[in-house]
Amino acid sequence: MMKTTKSLTSNLDLKKKRELHSIKVKKKHHSTVVIKVNHLEKSFQVSNNKIPILKDISFKVYSKDFLIIFGPSGCGKSTLLNVILGLEEPDSGEVILRDTKTYSLNESERADIRAKRLGVVYQQPTWIRSLSVLDNVAYPLILTGESRRNAINQALRRLEEMGLSKFRNYAPTELSGGQQQKVSLARALVKNPWTLFLDEPTGNLDSKSEEEIIKMLTEINRKGKRTIVMVTHNYSFLLRANRVLHLLDGEVKGIHESIHEIQQFLRNQLMPEV
């Protein structure tokens, strides 16, 4: 078992070797803080029991980060993402997006920030089935008051970046799972968001589509300078991030902030001490 695990770690290292050569190791950050999460607590009431989900969660997201929130299913990752997005109010603590305290805003104001400033991609994309691929991508801009002409032009540009412009007049459900997720990514990026959030974006995809999506995200982050926060339980994605937050049982167990730290964390996960 140990030999197999070492081989897996070695293969992961070799697979990412080319990317790692282009990354500078940074122990400390001097970039702008774009998200602050301070002492978040969140619980759910189940019958007569109060079940804690998030326990004193604190961390920062910096401009141009590719931050992965990593942990097993049920550890609170998606709940944490929803709290950051302003969808689920915490019991205590605060989320600050670019100097705005999210939960000092009312629900309508939070929805306005999501609509205009944040891009979100979920594991299972949802579509307006009566609209084409192009119109689905353009729709977030039209909702915020953009003219249809400008919205369509920007949507087409995003689809071209994804290599999907030839499918612009298709219905989204006519596309493969991987293609649909690329369209979902184009839709999230069309409004030029402050930060791109992803919740297990490749959970329903085959390995080829999964690799295509993560390569796109890496390029969006490094070449496009887009801040990304992604939730995943997939070990193979960790070496694509510049920071990894390890969440377990609703608690932050560590934040790994250099490639060397992430590699060591990955080895520890794959080869735990007996």
Image: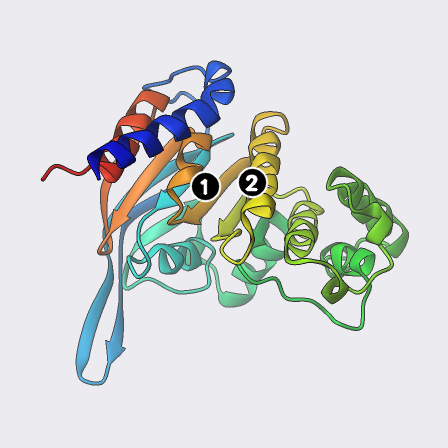
Q: Which residue is mark 2?
A: 211
Dot 2: what SS? helix
Residue shown at the point (78%, 46%) measured from the top left = 164
Q: Is residue 219 above or below residue 18?
A: below
Q: Position of residue 246 (x, y in %)?
A: 29, 42
| Farthest residue, direction left | 274
Q: Which mark is residue 189?
A: none
* Label 1 environment density (alpha carbons within 10 Å; few <14, some 14–19, many ≥20): few
Residue 99: assigned label: 1
Residue name at image x 74 percent, y 62 percent:
172
> Where is the C terminus found, in terms of image quarters?
top left
Q: Quadrant of the N terminus?
A: top left
Classify mark 1: helix, strand or loop.
loop
How was this image coloured?
rainbow
Image location (x, y in percent) of residue 259: 36, 23
> Along the polypeptide, which appears first: circle 2 or circle 1?
1
Q: Nearer the viewer, mark 2 or mark 1?
A: 2
Tell me the amino acid under the disc marked 2. Glu
At 35% from the left and 36% from the top, the residue drawn is 244
Please tell me how crowded label 2 is: few (under 14), some (14-19), or many (20+) other residues with Cα within 10 Å: some
Residue 231 placement, left or right of 124 = left
Q: Which quarter of the picture shows residue 99? A: top left
